Image (tube, rainbow, N blue to C red):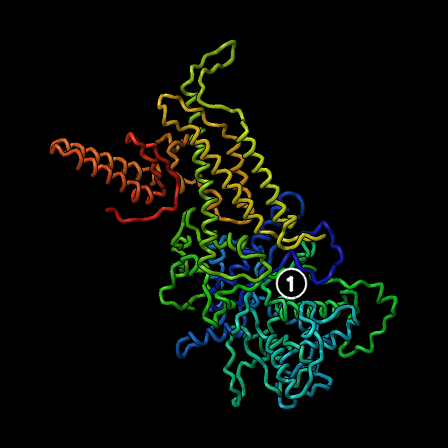
C-alpha cells in the first residue's frame, strides 16, 4: 500500500525492503492521532512480515523509526517545569516522554522498530556533515547573525567562517538539477511554485510559508507545532526564495545582552562550522536515512517512507529536496557534483544528460489521515484530544507532571507511575479477552475508520461499535473452544468406556459415543472458513474486487473493512453451527432418548485455527487471539489436560464450585425450613429467589450468562441454555 511520487528504477531483488517512519516529537504524552498512525502502520508492517515468512520477500524487512528529541517545543516545555535556579534539560524531558511513548506502543501491541534513531545522537557525526555537503554543492547559504546581512541578490556567504543560520536554496537546487527533478514533489502545485512577490503584502504570505517549515513535527501536527519562527520581515527578506527552509538554526550559548532570547540549554547546543546551534527539523530525517543507507547498503534498501498526512508538505517534500541535493553534490542521482553558485558552469552534453536516468530517493510514501473529534482535528491546542493512556485506562502519574530527575538513566528509572508496575508489566485496568480497549481500537483502525489514508472521526460510540464486533469474535473463539473441548472429552470417554479387546492382533471398540463422519453442515462450515481465509488474504493485499480503496489495475492497498466483515461473518457462522449442534443434542420431550454423538472435532478446529490465524496476522493481542484457550477466559471444566486431571483448578473454577456449594446449602436450608414450618409456598418462593440470584448476579460475575427456558402448561421447564459473557459485577439482593 503506497502512494508513489513517481516510478522508480527497479532495485536488486536480493536486498530486503527497509522503510522509515517519522516518529514523535517527545515533549508530551501521545494521543489517539498518533495511535491511529502507528497502529495502522503496524498492521501494514505485519502483513509485510508475513509475506517475508511465506517466502515472497527476502531478507526480512527492516523497520526504522526516528525520535525527535531536539526541538523548540521540548526546550520550551523543559523551561516551564524546571525549578527556580536550575538549568533546563530538554534531553532529560525527552527521555521521559520517549519511555512513555514506547510503553504506549507496547500497550497497543505495536511491534517495536528494528532501528531507532534519536536526533541528539546524530547531530555532529551525521547531520552537520550532511548540511556541509549540500553547501558544497551550492544549494544552501548562510544568513549571518551580524548586522552586515546579505541582500537577497548577494553572493550568499556559502562558505567561510561566518556564523549564522543555514537555509536550503530552492532556486539553486532547481537550476543545478537542470529539470531532472523539481522542488515540492509532494506539495500542492501553488506552494511548490515561486510566484510569491517580495512586497510587504506578499511577505505576509511568505511568512506563512516560512512558518510551516519550522517543526511541524507531530504525526497529527497540532496547531502549536509550528515552533519557533524566524518570521520578522528583516529576516524573511534575507531568504533568496520564500520556499527556502532552515537546515541549521544558529543559537549562541551566550546571547548578546540586547537579545531577548534566553540562553540555549547546553544539552541541545551543538558545534558546527556556522556556530553553535541545532538542526532544522526537516534535515534530520534525510540525514539519518542517508547514514542508515550506508550502514545497511549490503542487505537493505529504503523503499518506503511513512508518516501522518500533515507531514506530506512541507516536511516530506523538503526531505526529498534535501536528499536529491545531497545526491547531486555527492555525484549521485545522475548528476555531477556542482560547485557553489556554479549553475552556469555545469557543461554537460544533452546526450549525456539524457543517458543518465534520475534515481528516486525513496519511491513509495505512505501517509495516514487526520483524526477528528466532534468535527475538529484532534489537537492539544484545541483541548479536544484523548491521550493513549486515557483510552487504555492506564493509571495516571502521581502528580500529573513528569519529573526529569535522573531521567537519562533509562534502565534504573522507576516506571511505576508511568503506566507500568514495578515488575515492568503494564498497569492497565482491563486485562481480559472480553474487555480490551487496545484491541477494540485496533479493530476500529482496521475496519471501522475507513481507509487508513483518509480522515477518521473518533467517538465513544464508534469504539463501542468496535467492542461489539470484537466481542462476537471472542464469543465464537471461547464457545468454539469450549465445545471443542467437550466433544473431545466425549470422544475420550467413548474410548475409556469402550469394551476393548484384541481381535486378530487388532484393537476393537464397541463404543458409539463419537463420530468422525463429516456431514453437510461440517462441509459447509469448512468451505466458509476456507473462503474467508482467501478473502482476508485478498483484503490485506488490496486484491478485493469491491475494495473501498480502488480496484483498478495496479491497485495495492489494505482493505480493512472487507477483512473485518469476513471475520465477523465467519464468527457468526461458527456460532450458529455450535448452537445447532447443541439443539440437536437436547431432547426435552423424551429424556430417555440417547442424544446423538457429538460431531467430528476437526471441522470446528479448522475454523478456530483460521480465525486465530487471521486476527493474529493483523496484530491483535494474545487476549483476543488466544481467547478460549487461556483459563482466564473459559471454565475448561472438561479439559483433558494434565493440569485438569491433577484437579489444579483455575480461580474461576474454584469460585464456581464455591458458589454451587453455597447455593446447594441455601436451597437445602430453605426446603428443610419449609417442611418444619409446613409452609411450602414460602419455601418455593425463597428457592426461586435463590435461583434468580444465581442467574442475575453470581454467574454473570464469573462471565457466564444463563438463559431460562419457557415453562409449559404442565409447569415443567423447557430447559435452559448458558453462554459466556463479559464479566460484570452486581450487588446481590
Name the quadrant containing residue 82. Answer: bottom left
Question: In the rendered image, is residue 83 in sight?
Answer: yes
Question: In the rendered image, is residue 92 in sight?
Answer: no
In the displayed structure image, the side of residue 135 where residue 393 appears, left or right: left
Q: Give the residue drawn at x 44%, y 54%.
A: 464
Residue 43: x and y in percent read 57, 52
Q: Give the residue drawn at x 64%, y 76%.
A: 245
Q: Give the residue drawn at x 36%, y 31%.
A: 646
For the residue pair 679 and 113, the one nearer the viewer reads as 679
Q: Give the residue drawn at x 67%, y 77%.
A: 243
For the residue pair 464 and 558, the one nearer the viewer reads as 464
Q: Is residue 27 above or below residue 260?
A: above
Q: Is residue 234 above or below residue 322?
A: below
Residue 329: x and y in percent read 74, 70
Q: How many marks?
A: 1
In the displayed structure image, the side of residue 588 where residue 79 appears, left or right: right
Residue 207: x and y in percent read 61, 81
Residue to which mark 1 is pinned: 289
Amino acid at each position: 500500500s503506497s502512494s508513489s511520487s513517481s516510478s522508480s528504477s527497479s532495485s536488486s531483488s536480493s536486498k530486503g525492503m527497509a522503510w522509515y517512519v517519522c516518529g514523535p516529537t517527545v515533549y508530551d504524552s501521545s494521543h489517539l492521532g498518533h495511535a491511529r498512525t502507528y497502529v495502522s502502520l503496524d498492521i501494514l508492517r505485519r502483513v509485510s512480515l508475513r509475506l517475508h515468512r511465506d517466502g515472497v520477500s527476502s531478507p526480512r524487512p527492516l523497520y526504522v523509526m526516528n525520535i525527535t528529541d531536539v526541538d523548540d517545543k521540548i526546550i520550551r516545555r523543559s523551561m516551564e517545569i524546571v525549578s527556580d535556579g536550575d538549568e533546563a534539560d530538554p534531553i532529560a524531558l525527552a527521555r521521559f516522554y520517549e519511555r512513555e511513548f514506547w510503553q504506549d506502543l507496547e500497550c497497543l501491541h505495536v511491534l517495536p522498530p528494528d532501528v531507532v534513531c534519536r536526533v541528539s545522537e546524530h547531530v555532529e557525526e551525521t547531520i552537520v556533515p550532511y548540511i556541509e555537503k549540500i553547501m558544497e554543492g551550492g544549494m544552501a547559504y548562510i544568513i549571518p547573525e551580524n548586522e552586515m546581512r546579505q541582500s537577497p541578490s548577494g553572493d550568499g556567504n556559502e562558505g567561510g567562517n561566518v556564523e549564522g543560520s543555514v537555509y536550503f536554496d530552492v532556486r539553486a537546487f532547481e537550476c543545478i538539477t537542470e529539470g531532472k527533478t523539481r522542488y515540492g514533489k509532494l506539495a500542492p502545485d501553488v506552494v511548490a511554485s515561486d510566484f510569491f512577490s517580495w512586497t510587504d503584502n506578499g511577505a505576509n504570505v511568505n511568512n506563512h510559508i516560512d512558518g510551516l517549515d519550522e517543526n511541524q513535527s507531530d504525526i497529527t501536527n497540532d496547531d502549536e507545532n509550528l515552533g519557533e519562527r524566524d518570521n520578522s520581515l528583516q529576516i524573511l527578506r534575507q531568504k533568496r526564495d520564500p520556499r527556502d527552509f532552515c537546515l541549521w538554526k544558529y543559537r549562541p550559548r551566550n546571547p548578546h545582552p540586547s537579545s531577548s532570547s534566553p540562553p540555549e540549554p547546553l544539552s541541545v547546543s551543538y558545534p558546527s562550522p556556522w556556530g553553535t546551534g541545532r538542526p532544522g527539523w526537516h534535515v534530520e530525517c534525510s540525514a539519518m536515512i542517508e547514514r542508515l543507507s550506508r550502514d545497511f547498503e549490503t542487505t537493505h534498501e529504503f523503499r518506503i517512507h511513512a508518516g501522518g498526512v500533515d507531514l506530506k508538505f512541507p516536511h516530506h517534500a523538503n526531505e526529498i529536496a534535501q536528499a536529491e541535493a545531497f545526491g547531486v553534490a555527492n555525484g549521485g542521482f545522475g548528476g555531477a557534483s556542482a560547485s557553489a553558485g556554479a549553475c552556469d558552469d555545469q557543461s554537460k552534453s544533452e546526450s549525456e544528460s539524457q543517458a543518465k536516468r534520475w534515481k528516486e530517493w525513496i519511491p513509495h510514501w505512505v501517509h495516514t489521515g487526520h483524526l477528528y473529534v466532534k468535527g475538529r482535528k484532534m489537537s492539544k491546542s484545541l483541548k479536544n484530544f484523548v491521550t493513549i493512556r486515557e483510552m487504555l485506562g492506564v493509571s495516571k502519574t502521581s502528580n500529573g507532571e513528569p519529573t526529569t530527575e535522573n531521567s537519562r538513566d533509562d534502565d534504573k528509572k522507576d516506571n511505576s507511575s508511568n503506566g507500568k508496575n514495578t515488575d515492568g508489566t503494564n498497569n492497565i485496568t482491563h486485562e481480559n479477552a472480553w474487555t480490551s480497549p487496545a484491541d477494540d481500537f485496533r479493530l476500529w483502525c482496521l475496519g471501522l475508520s475507513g481507509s487508513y489514508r483518509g480522515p477518521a472521526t473518533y467517538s465513544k460510540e464508534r469504539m463501542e461499535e468496535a467492542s461489539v464486533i470484537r466481542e462476537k469474535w471472542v464469543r465464537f473463539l471461547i464457545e468454539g473452544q469450549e465445545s471443542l473441548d467437550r466433544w473431545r472429552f466425549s470422544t475420550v470417554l467413548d474410548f475409556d468406556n469402550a469394551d476393548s479387546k484384541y481381535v486378530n492382533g487388532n484393537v476393537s471398540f464397541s463404543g458409539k459415543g463419537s463420530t468422525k463422519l463429516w456431514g453437510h453442515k461440517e462441509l459447509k462450515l469448512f468451505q466458509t472458513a476456507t473462503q474467508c481465509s482467501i478473502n482476508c488474504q485478498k483484503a490485506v493485499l488490496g486484491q478485493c474486487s469491491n475494495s473501498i480503496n480502488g480496484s483498478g489495475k495496479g491497485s495495492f492497498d489494505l482493505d480493512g473493512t472487507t477483512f473485518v466483515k469476513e471475520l465477523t461473518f465467519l464468527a457468526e457462522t461458527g456460532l450458529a453451527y455450535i448452537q445447532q449442534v447443541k439443539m440437536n443434542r437436547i431432547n426435552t420431550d423424551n429424556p430417555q432418548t440417547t442424544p446423538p454423538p457429538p460431531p467430528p472435532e476437526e471441522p470446528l478446529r479448522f475454523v478456530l485455527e483460521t480465525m486465530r490465524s487471521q486476527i493474529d496476522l493483523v496484530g491483535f493481542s494474545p487476549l483476543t487471539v488466544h481467547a478460549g484457550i487461556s483459563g482466564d477466559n473459559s471454565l475448561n471444566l472438561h479439559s483433558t489436560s494434565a493440569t485438569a486431571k491433577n484437579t489444579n483448578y483455575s480461580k474461576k473454577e474454584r469460585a464456581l464450585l464455591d458458589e454451587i456449594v453455597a447455593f446447594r446449602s441455601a436451597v437445602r436450608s430453605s426446603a428443610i425450613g419449609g417442611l418444619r414450618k409446613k409452609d411450602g409456598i414460602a419455601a418455593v418462593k425463597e428457592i426461586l429467589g435463590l435461583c434468580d440470584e444465581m442467574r442475575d448476579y453470581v454467574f454473570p460475575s464469573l462471565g457466564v450468562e444463563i438463559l431460562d427456558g419457557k415453562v409449559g402448561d404442565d409447569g415443567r421447564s423447557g430447559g435452559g441454555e448458558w453462554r459466556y459473557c463479559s464479566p460484570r459485577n452486581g450487588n446481590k439482593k
